[in-house]
Amino acid sequence: MQMKRWIVFGLMLVIVSGCSESTRQDFIERGDVVDVHGAVSNVEKLEQFMENRDEVTVVRYTTEGDPIFYTLRGKDGGIFIKRNTKQDDYGPKGISTAVCHTLTKEGHSFVLNGCEGDFIGDDGRYVLLKVQSERTP
């Protein structure tokens, strides 16, 4: 009986792992910037946003594998950011916002500067993304 439980548990784990990976792939195929612990797909979309300030979504995965969504949109010469943590099982769930003046690339990091908002520190800077390696879809 105990062996049966382990088999069922193992199958459930494989199914859940497969689902989360296909979701990541869906985000990549949709054109979102996807960060899985420093391995980033579609980083060029963020670089394009720096030039045209249209709209881009960055999906960053937590250590536990939950997605946190950052939607950036150019607005009135600045950048409006909406952070959605509703799928983070281990953190506060909700939507928070910020407005920043610029997005710059500093080495391998993309940094928002001159920011004010719910999740921004006192210095007005927020490291949006650190690229350790680039993944191709």
Image (cartoon, grey):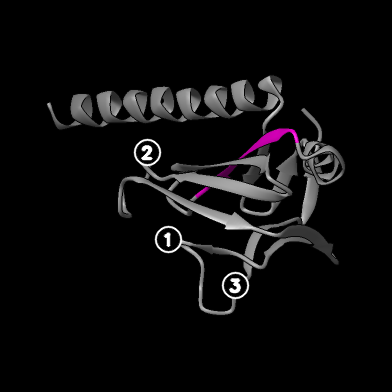
Q: Residues within 10 Å of mark 3 (few under 14, many from 20)?
A: some
Residue 128 or 133: which is nearer the viewer?
128
The residue depicted at 76 percent of the width and 55 percent of the height is: 131
Q: Is residue 19 above or below residue 39?
A: above
Under circle 3, the secondary element is loop
Residue at numbered disc 1: 118
- Specify the quadrant that holds the N terminus: top left
In the rendered image, the residue lying farthest to the left is 1
Identify the amino acid type marked 3. Gly
Q: Residues within 10 Å of mark 2 (few under 14, many from 20)?
A: some
Residue at numbered disc 3: 124
Q: Is residue 95 magenta-colored?
A: no
Are the residues at dot 3 and dot 2 in contact (C-beta closer than 8 Å)? no
Res 108 visible: no
The residue depicted at 37 percent of the width and 45 percent of the height is: 88
> Spatial distance from mark 3 to mark 2, Cα to Cα?
26 Å
Which is closer to the viewer, label 2 or label 1?
Answer: 1
x%, y% of residue 98?
A: 52, 55
- The reply, left or right, for residue 19 in relation to residue 51 is left
Q: Earlier in the sequence, mark 1 or mark 3?
A: 1
Q: Is residue 60 magenta-colored?
A: yes
Q: Which residues are magenta?
A: 54-61
Residue 58 or 28: which is nearer the viewer?
58
Identify the amino acid type marked 2. Gln
x%, y% of residue 51?
A: 87, 43
Residue at numbered disc 2: 87
Residue 127 or 133: which is nearer the viewer?
127
> Spatial distance from mark 1 to mark 3, Cα to Cα?
11 Å
Q: Earlier in the sequence, mark 3 or mark 2?
A: 2
